[in-house]
Image (cartoon, rainbow, N blue to C red):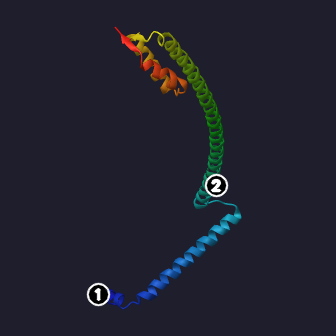
Amino acid sequence: MNAIKELTTLDFSLVFVSVFIILIGIKAIVSLFEWFIEKLGLETKGMRKRKEEHNLLIQTSQGLIQLQEKHEESVRQSIRHDEMIKADISSLTDKINEIADTLSVMQKKDNETKLKELKGSLIRYYHKYKDIGEWSKLEKDAFWDLFDDYEKRGGDGYIHTIVEPAMRELRETD
């Protein structure tokens, strides 16, 4: 019971400070001991472990540097490939535009040629039937189909002013 009474009368702040000072002292002694062992060239487990951790950290750091260099090279190659693809697409676009322009010119020339052919056919019909004054339903339908195609292709001029009125006055037989 006396031990319990003595325990309750203890100054715990003094005990705490004393334990703290003792721990600091032990730490200082251990550090001094490690320094001494290191000066003698001896190695402890803890020192060996720290050395291994240090070497591992250096290896990891070097690995990260190499990985970053590889990443940067990959990015450079990717940019170079993107530029090559962009140049190829630009070249391809230019070729497509050239082909489209050529095709447009060809279609225009083809339309002009077809227009001239239609005009010639319409004039032949005109010369054949204007003096006769009549034509069959089949010939009439063929003429007006050609005439519609002629107009759709942009034909105008004397076909409208001379040929069309004369052909509308022809009498249909059959």
Q: Which mark is residue 70?
A: none
The residue lying at 39 percent from left, 89 percent from top is 10
Residue 40, percent from left and from top: 70, 64
Front residue of 50 and 58? 58
Disc 1 marks which amino acid?
A: Met
Using a 10 Å C-alpha cutoff, classify the residue at mark 1 as few (fewer than 14 neighbours), some (14 to 19) or many (20 or more).
few
The residue lying at 41 percent from left, 87 percent from top is 12
Residue 33, percent from left and from top: 63, 70
**Marks 2 and 1 close (CB-CB < 8 Å):** no
Quarter occupied by residue 73: top right
Q: Which residue is mark 2?
A: 58
Using a 10 Å C-alpha cutoff, classify the residue at mark 2 as few (fewer than 14 neighbours), some (14 to 19) or many (20 or more).
few
Disc 2 marks which amino acid?
A: Ile
Residue 56, percent from left and from top: 60, 53
* Image side of residue 73 versus residue 17, left or right: right
Q: Quadrant of the C terminus?
A: top left
Q: Quadrant of the N terminus?
A: bottom left
Task: Label 1: state its secondary structure.
Answer: loop
* Image side of residue 83 versus residue 131, left or right: right
Marks 2 and 1, Cα distance to the nearest angstrom? 61 Å
Task: Label 2: state its secondary structure.
Answer: helix
Q: Which residue is mark 1?
A: 1
Front residue of 68 and 17? 68
| Up-down relation of residue 80 to residue 119 (above or below) | below
